[in-house]
Image (cartoon, helix red, strand yellow):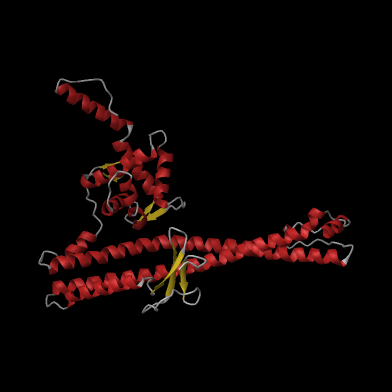
Amino acid sequence: MSSYTMAGMFAQGKVRNPGGKLMDGAKYVHVYEDNAGNKHGNWVDAEGRTAGEREAHKKQVEFMSSAGKSKYPADKDFLDSYNMSDKNCNTFHRDSTMNEINITQIKGEIAGFGKTVKASEYRMQSIQNDEKVALAALSIQQSAEEIWDNKQVKENQFKQVSFPNKESMGRYLQYQLEAITYHDAVDSKQTKQTEMDDKISKRKILEGQLFNAQHEREAYVGDWKKRRDGDLSITVAVTKERLAPPKRKRGLERTGSVLMTGEAKELATALVDFFVDKVGVTEANLDNSIESFWRIFDGDEGSNKLVLGQFTQMSQVITDAGQKLTRNDMKHIFQLLDTDNSGTLEKTEFVKEIAAIFHETHGEQSKKQKAASNARAAAFFGTANNNDAT
């Protein structure tokens, strides 16, 4: 179906509904655009789920209900934990869906104000181009520029104007009224744009919250399957421990500000290797390069913080570029860089931590240490040479 005018999430009755049988529980119409630019509509429920997604969720709930039928409390714990996670997912789904409804509505209002602006501009220009009015304006004490200066209207400073005839006066008043319409539409459009920017920022937060809730819910489903299949070492406590952010151990040395030990060091180094290879960073242009690296994650939207979902979704991009980092790897890196454990990665944190890792692994001091180490190894084996480490 390709006759929709705008993509987005619409309440029933606000847009032509999709053809076919009404989906059980349908509340909204989700209009999306395919690669060819055609727009299609799907029924979705209050959580923004299609019929297929509702069916998959229903089967998952039925599967987890087997935990509640068990006589063992450790089994029942899985159902309780799943239900809590599922409730959180549904809440974030509903919030996201309503946020999308608002974004779509505001987009339509912005488009409407944009049409008003263009129409008013056209009508004002038509009046200005009217030959009779232009000739009449020349006989008036004020210059034509003063008469057509619609800034007067915005500032509500109407000048005393005398006209040679009623026709020129009428056209002048028509112009002034059109200018009022124009400025009102411009101001309204700017207000709505600010409102939409806030909703888009909220979308990022909701996406991160939903990603975390879904990850938790799927962990309970996967671990219950393992326990049901016979692995009684898997309990809810084990699942929760696995889901909890890694605790930083005291007493470990920090390089710069990043805790650089074991797997965390390897993952962070892999990310910085990608940074160095793809952004072309050196110590001389480090600050600007890290700014460019940040924009890869925030999509050039000028944001000063990232949520987990935004950060981990870059996994595929980085892997496709030749540096394999899974979503789970990216999650660990996110937790490493999030030094205040706030759940969001501030731009200042990102810049500070990436710079620290770079100096540790790719800085000039690091190169000198590698060169000295290589020289000692070469001397030991009797094959010393004077090549610098690169």
Q: Nearer the viewer, residue 262 or 247?
A: 262
User: What percent of the width, then of the height, locates residue 154?
Assistant: 70, 61
Q: Is residue 238 above or below residue 138?
A: below
Q: Nearer the viewer, residue 21 or 354?
A: 21
> Image check: 1 left or right of 165?
left
User: What percent of the width, then of the height, locates residue 108?
Assistant: 54, 67
User: What percent of the width, then of the height, locates residue 290?
Assistant: 40, 42
Residue drawn 87% across the image and 56% down it: 141
Pick the quarter of the image with the C terminus.
top left
User: What percent of the width, then of the height, locates residue 287?
Assistant: 42, 39
Pick the quarter of the image with the N terminus.
bottom left
Quarter of the rendering containing residue 97: bottom left
- For the image shown, how many numbered marks are present on the structure? 0
Residue drawn 27% across the image and 72% down it: 84
Q: Is residue 371 visible?
A: yes
Q: Is residue 235 visible?
A: no
Residue drawn 22% across the image and 75% down it: 62
